[in-house]
Image (tube, rainbow, N blue to C red):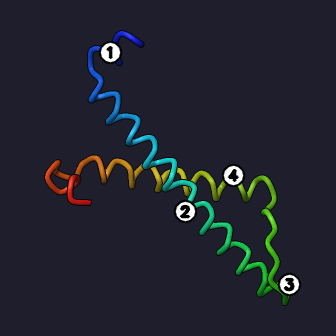
Amino acid sequence: MVEWLVRKPTQAIGIMGNIIVTGITFGVFMTEALIHYNMGQSKARGEFKLTLPPPNELAKIAAVTATFSIVTGLLIKALPKNVQSKI
């Protein structure tokens, strides 16, 4: 693996860039999803407080969020190079 990184450093940087974009997107989308979850729960409770959903619900939210984060990363990667440099 290290040999590949040495021979193809720009590809390695590109892959790391995609992982970073996907990770940041996941963090932002997951935060938003948890806020929306709590907003829905607050209507039922009559008060707003931040809580984590039960583990099975959290897993579902994370799976959907991860899927859309990966799709976002792939769409950004698919942009033509001249458009990517302007973003």
| Position above or below: 50 against 13 | below
Type of amino acid at the residue the image marks with label 3: Arg
Residue pictured at 28% horizontal, 29% vertical? 11
Task: Look at mark 4 in the image and give the residue it sits on.
Answer: 59
Q: How far apart are marks 2 and 3 (CA)?
A: 24 Å
Q: Upstream in the sequence, badge 4 or badge 3?
A: 3
Q: In this view, does 35 lie to the left or right of 22?
A: right
In the picture of the structure, the residue carrying the numbered disc 1 is 6
Q: Which of marks 2 and 1 is in front?
A: 1
Disc on the earlier residue, 3 or 1: 1
Instruction: Pick out the residue farthest to the left.
Output: 82
Disc 2, SS: helix
Secondary structure under tag 3 reads helix
Q: Which residue extends farthest top?
A: 3
Q: In this view, does 23 lie to the left or right of 61?
A: left
Do the CB atoms of the residues marked 2 and 1 lie less than 8 Å apart? no
Front residue of 43/76: it is 76
The amino acid at mark 1 is: Val
Q: Residue at label 3?
A: 45
Label 2 sits on what residue type? Phe
Q: How crowded is mark 1: few (under 14 residues within 10 Å), some or many (20 or more)?
A: few
Earlier sequence position, callout 2 versus callout 3: 2
In the picture, the quarter occupied by the C terminus is: bottom left
Kindly identify the amino acid type of the residue bearing the numbered disc 4. Answer: Ala
Q: Counting other residues with Cα less than 10 Å from the Cα at mark 2, is it few (<14), some (14-19), or many (20 or more)?
A: some
Q: Quadrant of the N terminus?
A: top left
Q: How far apart are marks 3 and 1 (CA)?
A: 56 Å
Q: Mark 2 points at which residue?
A: 29
Q: Which of the marked residues, 2 or 1, is nearer the chain's N terminus? A: 1
Seen at 73% across and 59% down, the residue is 57
The mark that comes first in sequence, 4 or 2, is 2
25 to the left or right of 53 = left
